[in-house]
Image (spheres, grey):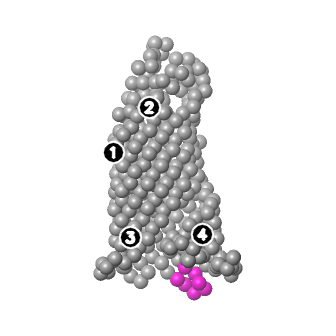
Amino acid sequence: MLRHLGPVLLGASLFAGPAAAQVTVPELREAFRNAARETDLVSGLLALTVFGATPGISTATFDVDDGDEFSTYRISPSRAFDAGFTGARVYLEGSLGYLAGGQGEDISIEVAEPTRVGFDFTTFSALGGAGLEFDLAQGTVLRPILLAGYSYTDVDAEFSGPEAGLLSAAGKGILWDAHLHNFIFGGALALQHDESFAGDLNLQARMRYTHYVARSFSATDSVLVGTRDFGVLVGAAELDGPTGLNVVGRQLRWIGFTTGTFLPGRSDALGFNYFVELGGGLELVDPDMVSGVEGVSLRGSGLLGNGVYGWSLGLSLEF
């Protein structure tokens, strides 16, 4: 979506041509619809919802090189447990995600002075996964996972300029005051290795490829209905060790981590297709706090990729 809105507006402005003063709302609306179709706007909208749903991508603020910005917020609990299978365990995971952002574009249809369009977009997602966990070696597990879920995407806009009324009427339901209801389904293959070292050091290394099919089954305009597929590859390593301190009777540990995320195929609709994250933090360990929760951590990180940079700071639950 970050990459698509500008070309949609440009295509509509070129449509006006020398007869700009004669442009009507229905004509401009059809120009918006044609430009949205030609630039594959639905891919950008669905890419946002997939990015907001994917486990393993940090809660963070992302700044794209052209000045656009969005933030993601996510909780992704997971659990493996014995269920009578020989050599395997049942694995369950969930992901609740929220993504919000905005961008600005200029467009001029009938007059020389441009009208500024400020976009705001949000996505809400709920994704569940189920699979099996196999022991490959000491401390190494393989997880094939099936995924299914739902997401909602909303796009709004504010206008400042002489053609605000014309644009608002022509693009309503296509570029602004637009929403989509989406199905998400797919599968993932995850590999994880845990290793302990002298000095009470623990290392966890993870690799996961997830392939999604996203379908907008209901939208405010038919041009926003479609099916697209996306891939997300995430590799991560995390090392933790003791600080020698206790807080309220619980062990305090330091954390260092790095994550690499690659978005092959259509996922470059976001305006970037990879980034690396490097960060650290402190974890308060308390495995008896809540079943399945090992503790809580304060983390901070920086992100850098091709066309994007960002940062993250906040509290996280350790599952």
Kindly identify the amino acid type of the residue bearing the numbered disc 1: Thr
Q: Pointer 2 and pointer 1: residues touching (CB < 8 Å)?
A: no
Q: State the image coordinates of residue 309 (x, y, percent, origin top left).
A: 58, 52
Q: Which residue is mark 3?
A: 91
**Amino acid identity at mark 4:** Val
> In the image, is residue 87 above or below residue 108?
below
Q: Which residues are magenta?
A: 196-202
Identify the amino acid type marked 3: Tyr
Residue found 36% across the figure and 49% down from its top: 183
Tell us which disc is closer to us: 2 or 1.
2
Q: Are marks 4 and 1 in contact (CB under 8 Å)?
A: no
Could you say whether the residue bearing mark 2 is in a helix, strand or loop? loop
Q: Is residue 271 left or right of residue 36?
A: right
N-terminal of the pair, mark 4 or mark 1, is: 1
Q: Is residue 169 above or below residue 268?
A: above
For mark 1, what is the residue?
A: 227
| Badge 3 element | strand
Is 234 rendered above or below residue 212?
A: below
Image x and y of residue 158, in percent: 57, 31
Question: Can you tell which of label 4 and label 1 is closer to the viewer?
Answer: 4
Name the residue that disc number 2 marks: 173
Is-magenta flag for residue 198? yes
Could you classify mark 4 by the number of other residues whose Cα lies within 10 Å: few (under 14), some (14-19), or many (20 or more)? some
Residue 124 highlighted magenta (yes or no)? no
